[in-house]
Amino acid sequence: MYKHLVVAVDGSATSLNALKHAADLASFGNARLTLVHVANPAEYMALAPEFLQHESYEAAAVAQGNEVLDFAENSAKEQGVANVVKHLLVANKGAREMAQELVDYADAQGADLLVLGTHGRSGLMHLLMGSFAETVMRQSHLPLLIIRSTEDEAE
């Protein structure tokens, strides 16, 4: 059975679905559950400065990331996970760097399962938006549990 699960959370319905599965596994096996959010300040650069209530894009990304982690921690504890750890990573480039940061962190922490959600995009949407889950899969040697979004979550 798994002793240390790392789950990527971003606040989306898809990542919360992945968290639910990871929390079930962790509580069943009395495993440690590490919640990881990869903050990307570049995502906030599209916002108009008047909407930014922080002194920098990185501060906004970190604040949002900490909110996501706090919510995920409460959710995991409500599901009966006793050993929950939170970690925030900051990646200043694109999805590839974000995926590598997640993989490197999980590996360094001795995780034996990496859990993440995917939107299951295909065709043009996949080409335009890429797949974080696919990038993680290509970079990780750890076992992966990929939870695909439901139709309701994809909308």
Image (cartoon, rainbow, N blue to C red):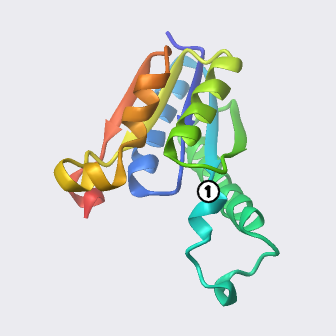
Residue 133 place in picture, x, y as percent: 40, 37
Residue 95 place in picture, x, y as percent: 50, 45
Residue 38 place in picture, x, y as percent: 62, 46
Residue 28 place in picture, x, y as percent: 49, 22
Q: Is residue 34 at least partly visible in the picture?
A: yes
Q: Is residue 28 at least partly visible in the picture?
A: no
- Residue 109 shown left or right of residue 135 in the figure: right
- For the residue pair 155 and 28, the one nearer the viewer reads as 155
| Outermost residue toward the bottom in this view | 50
Q: Residue 135's quadrant in the figure?
A: top left
Residue at 61%, 56% in the rendered image = 68
Q: Residues within 10 Å of mark 1 (few under 14, many from 20)?
A: many
Residue at 62%, 55% in the rendered image = 40
| Outermost residue toward the right in this view | 55
Q: Amino acid at mark 1?
A: Val
The residue tagged 1 is: 68
Give the number of callouts: 1
Q: Residue 66's quadrant in the figure?
A: bottom right
Residue at 34%, 37% in the rendered image = 147
Secondary structure beneath disc 1? helix
The C terminus appears in which quarter of the rendering? bottom left
Determine whether 132 is above or below 65 in the image.
above
- Residue 46 shown left or right of residue 61 in the figure: left
- For the residue pair 41 and 65, the one nearer the viewer reads as 41
| Outermost residue toward the top in this view | 1
Determine whether 138 is above or below 94 in the image.
above
